[in-house]
Image: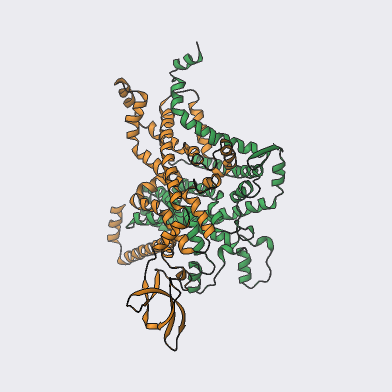
């Protein structure tokens, strides 16, 4: 009895028939996903310049990477970016979703408006915001001046915000290591929050609408005030949604590229390299000058490990509290 | 909840009700501020795109595009800019926007009027091969959507309704690859495309996106909900396996297929990093990369850059206003944030 017959006997289908349906997708996935992902790992052990493999170098790229201050700076900048975007985006989108869930009139209108930037291309958004942040002619500086504030350099400002605050308070000295993210990076963070908030609002709104009304009624009958209702009913029952939004926003934020590429600079990477995030560094190493693709692969692998661990955390958390 | 609330309200005093309506007023106020913050950048894009180059430099900036107009000798009006002002004499020196002729007129003869400079759009359009970029993006999007629909329905059908060796493991491998972000495999993909000789070709922007794992996943989940009885009945009636997919399953999955089409269109139209790396020449360059290139080369003519940005986002935004419900739903299920 051949293996084919064994399979048939177990009511398995003829593998050739299944293959007919599977092959178109499988070939593409194999050639353009599986092979690249596997080689991303392998390439980091080779010297690759301009798309040509020149030789095996073992762990040399990694030794170089872990002594590369620009790499660590890009990790730090990315961390600043993530910390700047994620909590603010979560807070604002949850706030908006809770307000929108209050049986307001014209809910559809608000949702449409908040979601509008999500369907707009990041390239166009970056151009518009770069114009708004323009140091001399920008709308934002105009608004600041009307409100009695000072014009700022925004995307062209390399100084860290803590350092700027300190000098604003008249302090002559501030420790170098604590100057914080540059104002340029803060400007990019503002745009990212603006761009992504609509998506998070829609997810939160769906989560809020899934909470059964009985819980609210019971809490009311028990005499809970609105703050109590939020912290004792809404917040715990919304937690799976919150975890999802938290981790998906974090994972996307680690991959920020387009805004950095288009809003900061020239030279790209921002004033004094203060907006050079990890994906931009990867792009610069691999494709810009020199094309050191082995090195870029090592950077990619570090990025992959960060995102993989976040994904695993996400799955753990979501699986342990299934409300979907 | 509605009934309980009204019952309650009747018993409560007017003070409580006032407090409640004050609360709702605060809610609306907060939402209006939010809406304003979301809208202003779009407003600013459109408004800037319709201004004259000189109006861009005006301080304070104009919210609605406005020009200075002066009367010509023959009684017609032309747009001018103000070269200097003589307050004591009450005159201004003006120069017409197109010509060099400078003349002095009474200050009262110059009026401000709202006007939209639509020619910025034509000018921006002609300064870079935007027609080509547009064509490229539409071509790429159409092919990717067709490819994704064909490969995903076939694969999802196999995963959902056929039994074959290693099915669940293959599916798991597919799913796990979905979690690897694009920047991670960008470099090896580039090398593969170099080896295939595909750099700067349409294939490089289409074929790698022909299979979309999340769409396979979404369709498989939906196909699994279609009852087996339907299949048995169809087979007894002499329906082939493929005909069952084509005539029964796909018509029953219209909503999911529409969602797939929407997020594929939006994702392809807006994709940037991949085409940025895989193309060098304007012949195959899609709109987003062309727009980015235009903004980097243009640099100073903000009204042209905003016009270009506006006509690049227009198709999706117009579509969004017609089908916002489906688009929001589709994007929310896909987890796609552009």
Labels in figure, total: 0
How does the figure colour the protein chain or chains? Answer: by chain
Q: Where is residue A96 in the image (x, y as percent from the top left)?
A: 42, 57
Depth check: A100 or A323 in front?
A100
Q: Where is residue A170 in the image (x, y as percent from the top left)?
A: 64, 73
Q: In which quarter of the image is residue B78?
A: bottom left
Left or right of residue B277, residue A23 in this image: left
Question: Chain A is which colour?
Answer: green
Q: Where is residue B191 in the image (x, y as percent from the top left)?
A: 59, 39
Q: Where is residue A319 in the image (x, y as percent from the top left)?
A: 49, 39
Residue A208 versus residue B11 in the image, above or below: above
Residue extending furthest toward the bottom: B88
Q: Can residue A43 be seen in this view?
A: yes
Left or right of residue A284, residue A56 in this image: right
Depth check: A254 or B284 in front?
B284
Question: Chain B is which colour?
Answer: orange
Residue at 46% x, 28% y is A22
């Amino acid at each position: 009895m051949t293996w084919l017959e064994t399979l048939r006997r177990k009511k398995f289908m003829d593998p050739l028939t299944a293959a007919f349906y599977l092959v178109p997708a499988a070939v593409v996935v194999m050639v353009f996903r599986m092979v690249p992902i596997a080689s991303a790992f392998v390439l980091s052990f080779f010297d690759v310049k301009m798309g040509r493999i020149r030789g095996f170098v073992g762990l040399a790229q990694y030794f170089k990477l872990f002594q590369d201050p620009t790499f660590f700076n890009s990790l730090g900048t990315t961390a600043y970016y993530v910390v700047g975007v994620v909590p603010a985006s979560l807070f604002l989108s949850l706030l908006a979703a809770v307000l929108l869930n209050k049986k307001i009139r014209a809910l559809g209108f608000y949702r449409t408006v908040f979601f509008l930037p999500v369907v707009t291309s990041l390239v166009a958004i970056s151009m518009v915001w770069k114009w708004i942040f323009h140091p001399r002619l920008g709308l934002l500086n105009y608004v600041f001046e009307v409100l009695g504030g000072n014009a700022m350099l925004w995307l062209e400002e390399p100084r860290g915000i803590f350092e700027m605050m300190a000098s604003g308070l008249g302090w002559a000295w501030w420790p170098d290591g604590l100057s914080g993210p540059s104002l340029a990076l803060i400007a990019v963070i503002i745009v990212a929050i603006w761009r992504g908030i609509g998506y998070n609002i829609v997810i939160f709104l769906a989560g809020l609408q899934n909470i059964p009304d009985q819980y609210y009624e019971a809490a009311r009958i028990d005499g809970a005030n609105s703050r109590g209702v939020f912290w004792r009913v809404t917040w715990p029952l919304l937690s799976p949604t919150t975890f999802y939004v938290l981790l998906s926003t974090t994972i996307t934020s680690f991959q920020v590229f387009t805004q950095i590429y288009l809003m900061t600079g020239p030279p790209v990477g921002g004033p004094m390299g203060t907006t050079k995030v990890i994906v931009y560094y990867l792009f610069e190493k691999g494709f810009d000058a020199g094309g050191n693709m082995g090195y870029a692969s090592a950077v990619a692998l570090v990025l992959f490990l960060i995102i993989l661990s976040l994904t695993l955390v996400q799955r753990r958390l979501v699986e342990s509290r299934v409300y979907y | 909840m509605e009934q309980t609330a009204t019952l309650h309200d009747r018993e409560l005093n007017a003070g409580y009700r006032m407090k409640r309506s004050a609360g709702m007023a605060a809610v609306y106020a907060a939402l209006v501020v939010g809406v304003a913050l979301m809208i202003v950048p779009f407003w600013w894009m459109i408004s800037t795109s319709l201004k004259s180059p000189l109006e861009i430099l005006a301080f304070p900036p104009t919210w609605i595009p406005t020009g200075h107009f002066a009367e010509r000798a023959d009684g017609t009006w032309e747009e001018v800019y103000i070269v200097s002002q003589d307050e004591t004499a009450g005159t201004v020196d003006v120069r017409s926007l197109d010509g060099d002729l400078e003349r002095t007129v009474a200050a009262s003869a110059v009026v401000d009027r709202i006007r939209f400079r639509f020619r910025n759009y034509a000018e921006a359009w002609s300064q870079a091969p935007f027609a080509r970029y547009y064509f490229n993006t539409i071509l790429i999007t159409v092919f990717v959507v067709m490819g994704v629909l064909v490969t995903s329905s076939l694969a999802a059908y196999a995963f959902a309704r056929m039994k074959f060796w290693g099915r669940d493991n293959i599916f798991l491998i597919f799913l796990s690859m979905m979690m690897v972000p694009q920047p991670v495999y960008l470099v090896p993909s580039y090398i593969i495309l170099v080896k295939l000789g595909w750099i700067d070709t349409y294939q490089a922007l289409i074929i790698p996106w022909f299979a979309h794992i999340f769409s396979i996943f979404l369709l498989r989940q939906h196909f699994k909900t279609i009852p087996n009885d339907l299949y048995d009945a169809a087979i007894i009636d002499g329906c082939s396996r493929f005909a069952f997919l084509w005539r029964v399953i796909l018509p029953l999955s219209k909503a999911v297929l529409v969602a797939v089409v929407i997020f594929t269109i939006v994702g392809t139209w807006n994709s940037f990093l991949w085409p940025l790396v895989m193309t060098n020449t304007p012949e195959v360059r899609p709109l987003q990369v062309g727009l980015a290139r235009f903004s980097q080369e243009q640099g100073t003519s903000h009204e042209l850059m905003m016009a270009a940005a506006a006509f690049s986002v227009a198709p999706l935004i117009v579509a969004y206003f017609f089908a916002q419900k489906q688009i929001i739903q589709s994007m929310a299920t896909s987890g796609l944030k552009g």
